[in-house]
Image (spheres, helix red, strand yellow):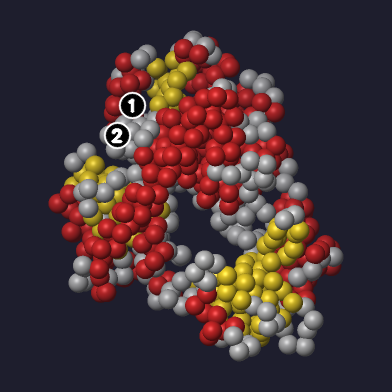
């Protein structure tokens, strides 16, 4: 499927902002254009963007119910009540539980604080009746719920009947009514008074601990040592790296690289990051999947045990175990994806649909979210993958750029037992007999609301430039745009009318990649580039010195200690 390139040109008003930034910052107009595209339009904006400071983060008491939450925790500690820290089984949930548990633990006895992660297969997502019963039976009178709970109205009522109070810390979209908890912390509340709506679940937990620290005169520095967990959650949960998240991620990455907790160090060691500078990409593709694998394949509680440990030997042993879970997950993910593709091949109506809904009661619940992502990427359609769990068809949904899959699922809410999520990812549960009707209604909504443009993969190009602009100074400033992530993606550039310098070649075991050396006509600049998985285009686009357009990101290539600038080519057009 051929990609559409969308050139992100500036409006006349933004062009004026760009002109002023060029005058004030004395840097490349292209770099100023990148700033304006990211909402950085003044000198003050640029200063805060390039130099994040911890005093840029917001007052936690601006969040609705924060005072109630802190008062209830203070009361519990004063009365020596037992507190249970409860969270989702994914990376965001387990890091949130770890952060809150580790911060509160010094202020109570070991016997008065515990944690609980629901079993993905037995209990499913969110607050469970089993978890509430566990709290009641073991004397916990307060549950701090993290990264879930915003729709758990009946479960919170059940907990209240058992004399168990609940504080909810969530970041998912709420329904019209909120659960009757002691406090509901969620920056996406309709009545939210908090300035930044895009915190991760761990981020909401962090704000609660920040407020608790302020209330009790605890130095903020006590929290900064836990920001490595926050960085892992922000990167893994794919929340925007803008505003407050950008500050938290910047300092979290610093903590992760300079002094990570023993558990994270163990994971970094087993995935080959020892002695290397860890980036957002490393978290997304190496650290996060291993933490996730614990909950997907066995028990997410093991991930929390690893992240809270102070025992080096245990951390090494558990990191190795979690690494093996990740390999199991990869094997199962591959097999399930193959099964799903087989189901699609056998579906005679597939070509007439704008969405994908596949169901197999034998698939593992632990990998269906990954499979949904793979199907969405391959066919470029909103995708739902369902399996059978506790007598219900339970699934994960993944979307494509610009299409709100949460709204599509919400349009079928009368068929569902439960659902929740974001614009691009969601979870859902329904009676097995409702699957065919859900497939029909879901596709009906998608077909009525998806645009032709959304059906075609899109590459957003930040700027069209010449190779001559890519200087060491340009690249040095470009690196300061990091950390990269949603709403602050790594800038993508395009250069037109380039040709092979005569030395480009195919590389890789099966000659599947292109090692490029490109130049512009009448120019002495030769740029090195790599185009992974694009070897089949070599004869069409490179051999024969045909002019081409390329879009790419600019990377640092470190080979045997020699550093150089390299283009990471994303697409080629004649």
> What residue is pinned by disc 1?
131
Quarter of the picture containing the C terminus is: bottom right
Residue shown at the point (21%, 68%) measured from the top left: 347
Q: Is residue 458 above or below residue 157?
A: below
Q: In this orientation, does residue 332 appear?
A: yes
Q: Please state the horizontal and vertical placement of residue 426, each as a whole percent of the image.
A: 37, 51
Residue shown at the point (55%, 67%) measured from the top left: 508
Q: Is residue 287 above or below residue 521?
A: above
Q: Mark 2–mark 1 contact, CB under 8 Å?
A: yes
> What residue is pinned by disc 2?
123
Residue shown at the point (29%, 46%) measured from the top left: 364
Q: Along the line of sight, which residue is nearer the eye, 138 or 299? A: 299
Q: Please state the horizontal and vertical placement of residue 42, each as a whole percent of the image.
A: 75, 59
Q: Along the line of sight, which residue is nearer the eye, 232 or 169? A: 232
Q: Is residue 265 above or below residue 187?
A: above
Q: Along the line of sight, which residue is nearer the eye, 84 or 259? A: 259
């Amino acid at each position: 499927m051929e990609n559409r390139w969308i050139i992100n040109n500036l409006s006349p008003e933004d062009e004026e902002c760009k002109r002023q930034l060029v005058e004030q910052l004395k840097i490349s107009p292209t770099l100023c254009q990148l700033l304006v595209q990211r909402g950085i339009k003044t000198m003050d904006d640029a200063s805060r963007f390039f130099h994040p400071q911890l005093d840029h983060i917001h007052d936690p008491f601006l969040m609705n119910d924060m005072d109630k939450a802190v008062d209830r925790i203070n009361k519990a500690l004063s009365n020596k009540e037992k507190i249970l820290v409860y969270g989702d089984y994914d990376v965001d949930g387990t890091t949130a539980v770890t952060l809150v548990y580790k911060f509160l633990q010094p202020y109570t006895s070991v016997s008065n604080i515990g944690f609980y992660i629901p079993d993905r297969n037995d209990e499913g997502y969110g607050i469970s009746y089993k978890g509430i019963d566990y709290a009641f039976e073991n004397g916990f009178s307060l549950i701090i719920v993290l990264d879930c709970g915003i729709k758990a109205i009946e479960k919170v009522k059940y907990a209240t009947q058992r004399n168990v109070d609940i504080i909810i810390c969530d970041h998912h979209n709420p329904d019209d009514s909120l659960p009757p908890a002691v406090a509901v912390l969620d920056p996406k509340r309709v009545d939210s008074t908090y300035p930044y709506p895009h915190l991760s679940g761990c981020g909401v937990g962090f704000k609660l601990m920040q407020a608790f620290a302020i209330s009790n005169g605890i130095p903020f520095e006590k929290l900064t040592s836990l920001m490595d967990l926050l960085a892992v959650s922000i990167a893994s949960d794919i929340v925007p790296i803008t505003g407050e998240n950008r500050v938290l991620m910047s300092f979290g990455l610093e903590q992760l690289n300079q002094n990570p907790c023993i558990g994270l160090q163990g994971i970094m060691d087993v995935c080959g990051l020892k002695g290397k500078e860890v980036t957002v990409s490393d978290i997304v593709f190496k650290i996060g999947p291993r933490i996730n694998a614990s909950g997907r394949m066995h028990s997410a509680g093991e991930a929390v045990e690893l992240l809270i440990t102070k025992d080096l030997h245990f951390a090494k042993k558990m990191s190795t175990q979690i690494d093996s879970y990740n390999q199991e997950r990869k094997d199962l993910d591959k097999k399930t994806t193959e099964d799903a593709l087989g189901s699609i091949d056998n579906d005679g109506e597939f070509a007439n649909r704008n969405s994908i809904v596949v169901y197999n009661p034998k698939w593992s619940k632990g990998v269906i979210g990954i499979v949904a992502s793979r199907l969405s990427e391959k066919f470029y359609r909103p995708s739902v993958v369902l399996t059978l769990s506790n007598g219900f068809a339970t699934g994960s949904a993944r979307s494509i750029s610009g299409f709100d899959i949460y709204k599509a699922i919400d349009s079928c809410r009368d068929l569902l037992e439960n659902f929740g999520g974001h614009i691009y990812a969601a979870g859902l549960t329904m009676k097995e007999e409702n699957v065919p009707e859900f497939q029909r209604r879901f596709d009906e909504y998608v077909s009525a609301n998806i645009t032709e443009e959304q059906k075609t993969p899109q590459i957003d190009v930040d700027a069209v430039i010449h190779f001559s602009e890519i200087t060491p100074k340009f690249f040095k400033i470009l690196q300061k745009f990091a950390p990269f992530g949603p709403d602050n993606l790594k800038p993508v550039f395009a250069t037109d009318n380039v040709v092979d310098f005569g030395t480009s070649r195919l590389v890789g075991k099966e000659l599947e990649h292109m090692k490029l050396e490109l130049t512009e006509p009448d120019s002495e600049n030769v740029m090195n580039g790599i185009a992974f998985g694009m070897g089949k285009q070599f004869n069409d686009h490179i051999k024969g010195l045909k002019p081409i357009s390329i879009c790419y990101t600019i990377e640092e290539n470190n080979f045997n200690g020699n550093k150089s600038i390299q283009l990471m080519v994303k697409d080629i057009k004649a």
